[in-house]
Amino acid sequence: MKIESILIPKDTKEVESVTQDAFSETGDASLVEWLSFGEMENVINGGRGICLKAVDDAGRILGVTYAEQERPSNGNEGVEKWVIILAAVLREKSGKKIGSQLLQEMEKVVQDRGGAKMFVFTNEGDERVINFYRKNGYKDAGRIEDYQYGKGNSAVFLLKYL
Ligand SMILES: CC(C)(COP(=O)(O)OP(=O)(O)OC[C@H]1O[C@@H](n2cnc3c(N)ncnc32)[C@H](O)[C@@H]1OP(=O)(O)O)[C@@H](O)C(=O)NCCC(=O)NCCS
């Protein structure tokens, strides 16, 4: 397996289908509610986003991760801080450390681009995802009530200094 940047537009459809598969049995299965592949591509093309893929020997994408600079209009603070928007591994390949390897590579690439810290947020109570980030060195950084979707959907934040 190797990890490399996705190629746009060649990989776009496969990235979407891997993501759809990974989330299909989660509460976030309706991707259109929280993810825009079109906007992801714009941000990548603008140099403020990174999308990595894990590919097997046959070139099949097994997992992807996407991160972007949090908010360039915040000056240094906004460009040093990156946010992970997406981590997705095919269900049939989950639990084999593919997600962890993608995350570690993402941290290196972000550091090379001048990033100093990464944060991520997920649905409160999603222990599987929270544990995934904790296992990878992310520390609990608080919660925001009613942050996602409608009322009653709170988010927990995790942060890692690179
Ligand atoms: C979250 C996800 C990216 C993790 O990728 P992965 O390759 O399966 O994870 P890893 O094998 O690197 O696991 C690392 C740790 O995460 C946690 N974890 C992963 N899968 C888990 C599961 N099915 N149940 C509980 N904990 C799990 C464990 O703590 C694990 O450490 P361990 O194996 O030492 O116990 C993947 O499972 C996925 O695509 N999930 C659905 C989409 C999603 O919710 N993405 C995250 C929000 S953007």
Image (cartoon, helix red, strand yellow):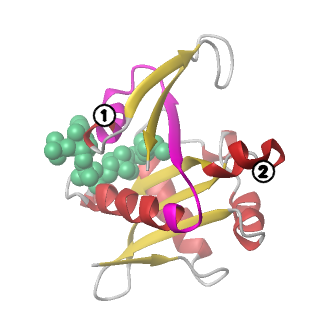
Q: What residue is disc 2 on?
A: 72
- Point out residue 47 in the picture as x, y percentages from the top left corner: 72, 69
- Point out residue 32 in the picture as x, y percentages from the top left corner: 68, 46
Q: Which circle, 2 or 1, is nearer the viewer?
A: 2
Question: What residue type is disc 2 on?
Answer: Pro
Q: Can residue 101 be seen in this view?
A: yes
Quick one: label 2 or label 1, which is nearer the N terminus? Answer: 2
Instruction: Residue lying at the far bottom in this picture: please name it.
Output: 58
Quadrant where the N terminus sits is bottom left
* Whether residue 60 is situated above or below residue 138 in the rendered picture: below
Q: How many labels does the image show?
A: 2
Which residue corresponds to the image point at 67% horizontal and 81% vertical from the top-left?
9
Which residue corresponds to the image point at 54% horizontal and 76% vertical from the top-left?
6
Q: Residue 128 carries which label?
A: 1
Task: Give the residues drawn in magenta, as a range.
Answer: 111-133
Question: What residue type is disc 1 on?
Answer: Arg
Mark 2–mark 1 distance (CA, rounded to whole Å): 31 Å
Q: Does the residue labelled 1 lie within 8 Å of ligand 1?
A: yes
